[in-house]
Amino acid sequence: MEHVFSAKESAVLRTLPPHTTVYTPMPLLHLWLPPHRLLAGQRRLLALPTPTYPPFRLSVRAEAAAVHEACALPFPPGRAPHHRELAAAVASVERACRLCVDVKATLLSNDRDKRRVVEKNDQTHVTTADFGVQALISFELQQLFPSIPLVAEEDSAFLRSPDADAGIIESISSFIARNVSNNGSPLTHDDVLRAIDRGGREAVSFDSKPATYWILDPIDGTKGFLKGNDTLYVVGLALVVDGKLAVGVMGCPNWSNATTIGNKEDESTGACHGDGMLMVSHVGCGTWSRPLSAGIGQYTTPLDAWKRCSVDPCLVVHTARFCIVDSHTWDMMPLSAHFDSTMDESEPRDENKILLQNSCGGSLSKYLMVACGRMSVFILLARAAKLLKAWDHAVGVICVEEAGGQICDWSGKPLDFAADRTGRRIIYPTGGILSTNAALHDKLVEMVSENYK
């Protein structure tokens, strides 16, 4: 049936760029939550009643955004059952990246804000950007998908404690107000704290049944974020549907500072040359990337900005490019029994030496580089003293796999994101994690497993 646009819809559509394709299997200018039957834990089988009230009407500006988000992904809704969730995730992650840029500029120029960096019990740091990103994405997802719980890294315990700087919550709220998509009343401090806690460990309890939930790492690579240099940091959001990874979005605001390998320009498939990178993935639809939009409120990203991502085609192990996290050394890896390593690309290499990079940020930046073909292999050691968190890996896994790569633990088994039955916060891979371009996968699994004890 042909869709007839109203005068108001036509006015909104005129704001889109020429030759933009608009898909219309869903209402374009009204957003309301369809019944979600896939909920966490024992609530999973409960069906929500179909709403009998009119859909919430958005402002004209928000309507333009809704039209854009519905049609500006690189594949149509008919191919992607979670198209609406992915569109919302893309919009939220992009706004979160702008928040990160705002906070980083302030941290580097304001001594008072530098003191608002908190060291957690595990010796990792958290900033106003971590809290702000989690609150922003949590709030926006809850408006559209209130039945889908959130598993995320932070909670508001420190912010509510007597030791917290009195101005930190005000600072967080201020950054959120500049970037959040909110057509209602301005968010209060309590609204911000509740939004943060929606992703905390006490917010939801699962059981052994497959569940549907979001997984968020507000900033992966906070250490690099604080350095103010070119070290990559990533906002990562994934959606698990009925126990399986279905959607992933990674935003890397400073990708443009890292598009070289040695002295060569990065010509890998899917590499973005611009102001930051946005990478999206949907099960069965591939992994795609584009530069971040020029600014908040620009709803004119053309479809041809998207580039299909493919993993590196390397077929020979010793010519592959490897990456590890900066807290690890090559001799900690079982592959060191087969190969020496060098970080100097100009150094001559034979079949006994590989090229290694270990200073490019947290785990998600490594997955991002494997997914876009910049790196061939990411290998990570799981240490007993440090549990591996689901949010450091979930979105990276779907992005690499949809780009043609493979991921497993050191025994060759897939990663189990439901291993933490009640929290879905911890993963327990045997030995560690191996993320590859697929062509090298079987050979590397064999080498790793025979040398892993």
Image: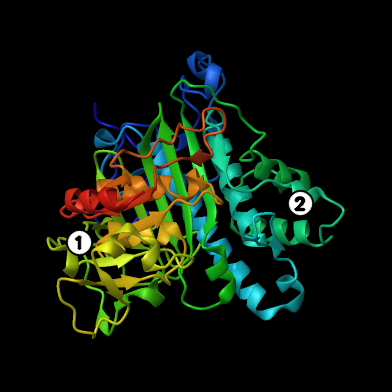
The answer to whether residue 448 is visible is: yes
Q: Secondary structure at mark 1?
A: loop
Closer to us: 182 or 268: 268
Q: Secondary structure at mark 2?
A: helix
**Disc 1 versus disc 2: distance between alpha carbons?**
42 Å
**Coordinates of residue 276 in the picture (x, y in percent):** 41, 68
Give me the residue at 45% from left, 31% from top.
418
Give me the residue at 60% from left, 27% from top.
205
Horizontal placement of 65 versus 25: left or right? right
In the picture, residue 336 is in which quadrant? bottom left
Q: How many marks?
A: 2
Q: Which mark is residue 158?
A: 2
- Is disc 1 surrounded by few (<14), some (14 to 19) or many (20+) residues within 10 Å? many
Closer to us: 196 or 187: 196
Circle 2: residue type: Phe
Establish if 323 lies above or below 427.
Answer: below
The colour scheme used here is rainbow
Residue lying furthest right: 162
The answer to whether residue 57 is visible is: no
**Coordinates of residue 305 in the picture (x, y in percent):** 28, 61
In the picture, residue 238 is in which quadrant? top left
Residue designated by label 1: 312
